[in-house]
Every structure is written in C-alpha cells, then in structure tokens.
Amino acid sequence: MVEHEHRLTDDSGVAGAIGRIVEPAIEALGFRLVRVRVSSMNGCTVQIMAERPDGSMGIDECEAVSRAISPLLDLDDPVGGAYNLEISSPGIDRPLVRRSDFEKWTGYQARIEMTRPTFGRKRHKGFLRGVSETAVKFERVDAKPEEEIHIELPFSDIAEAHLILTDDLIRESLRRDKALRRGADESSSDLQMASADAETPKQKSKTLPKQKKGPGLRSLEKEKVHGSQRKPA
C-alpha cells in the first residue's frame, strides 16, 4: 500500500467517478493515480495514468493495474457503454498533480494554468523554483516588462500543470530511469544470492492467467501504455 498524497485537482464528471472507483485499488498495488481522461477517440477511450512513487511504470505494471481495476469498472459501469481502457505511465512531459511533483522537478520548465487570473494572467510558462507550504515558486520566461518574473502560484488555484519537453528534461528522465533500473537489478541479484544460500526443498510460484490484450498494447518512446477493450456486461 502506497502512502496516500492528495492530488491538487480532482477529475470531474465521468473521469472523477472513475478515479474514485479505481484509486484505492491502484494504491493497494503500490502505485499512485496520476490522471483520468475520458475521450471520444476510437468510440470511447478511458485513459488512466499511474506510476510508482519513484515515477517508474513498466508494461507489466500497466497490465497489473488493468487486471485489478477492470472488474471494478465492470461492476460500477461509470461509463455506461463500450469503451477502450488504456493504462499508461505519465510520460516525460508529465502532468504535475501533487505538491511532491513540483518539488521533485524543481529546476525544469513547466506550463501552469490557473483557475483564475494570478499575477495578471491564467497561463504561465517558466521554471519551477521550489515550493512553499501553499504555493509553487515560479520563474516566468514569458513575463512582460511590467510583470514580475519571480512569483508564487497558490496550489489551491492551479487548474492544470505539466512539464515542458526539453533536452535537459529528456536527459534527466533517462538518467533517473537508468538509476532505477540499476537499483532494481541490484535488488534482484541480492535476492537470487539469498535464494541460492537458503535450504529450501522446492520453490513455489504462481503464474497469473494471461490477459487478452487489445491493439492498444504498445511501448512508446515517451510513455508505456497498456490498452484493452471493455464492454458492459
């Protein structure tokens, strides 16, 4: 079970209903819900972004989330019709939905949209410069001569925010991903050594039934996605 951290904004409408249904199950698996989107693409598509607290998310993990939440969505049927279910990682130019996201990506460029005009406008582009208890510290790169460059945008007024894809962000994302993979490999090696030293008569394992995967299963350069088609019972 992952420690719960509230998102700064809640999804509304059908997306909000889906989020309330699936978030406990996602957290029980050790992941965090990032965002839910419902679109009319390919009939109807429900996109659910999730990640581990360290930001990682692989294809196998997307499949695990899909297996866990599909029965819940079938039972409650918040969509009310046939739809394509797509589970994905947030991607490199990811949404920023929690206070910790803004803190984690301090120093990188982002776009932030506010619910009301703040420092003369609703949309801001610039660098994340840290966080306070109630706001994100921001250095605007598109400020007019009469506007302040260094500002604080209240978390309570943020409607949407995401990182801007830059060379620096790509390099840092690849570096973090490599570090996570190296840590996972070292942990796996330690477990194998411990297993070899232990005197166990026979190791037992359980194989999950293979899930039928739709055409949405693919590996993208920016994100990892698992998709399947769902139909109402």
Image: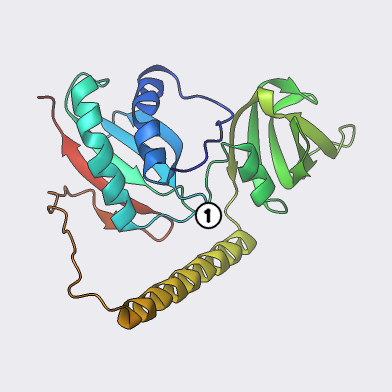
**SS type, badge 1:** loop
Is residue 145 found left or right of 196 in the rendered image?
Answer: right
Residue 43 in view, yes or no: no
* Location of mark 1 (residue): 54
Rendering quarter of residue 17: top left
Residue at 44%, 38% in the rendered image: 33
Q: Quadrant of residue 194?
A: bottom left
Q: Residue 140, percent across and down?
A: 78, 41
Locate residue 38: give its quadrant: top left
Residue 30 in picture, x, y percent from top left: 42, 46
Farthest-out residue, right = 146
Q: Is residue 66 above or below residue 200?
A: above
What colour scheme was applied to this rendering of the protein?
rainbow
Q: Say few, some or many: other residues with alpha carbon within 10 Å of mark 1 (under 14 / 14 to 19 / 20 or more).
A: few
Residue at x 32%, y 44% (from the top left corner): 87
Q: Establish if 190 lies above or below 174.
A: below
Q: Considering the image in quadrants, where does the C terminus appear? A: top left
Amino acid type, label 1: Asp
Q: Nearer the viewer, residue 129 or 110?
A: 129
Q: Position of residue 104 (x, y in %)?
A: 65, 50
Q: Quadrant of the N terminus?
A: top left
As drawn, is 177 to the left or to the right of 144? left
The residue depicted at 22 percent of the width and 35 percent of the height is 70
* Residue 229: percent from left, percent from top: 17, 38
Q: Closer to the camera, 144 or 23?
A: 23
Is residue 71 or residue 138 the one in the foreground? 71
Q: Which residue occupies the foreground of this view, 112 or 11?
A: 11
Q: Is residue 146 visible?
A: yes
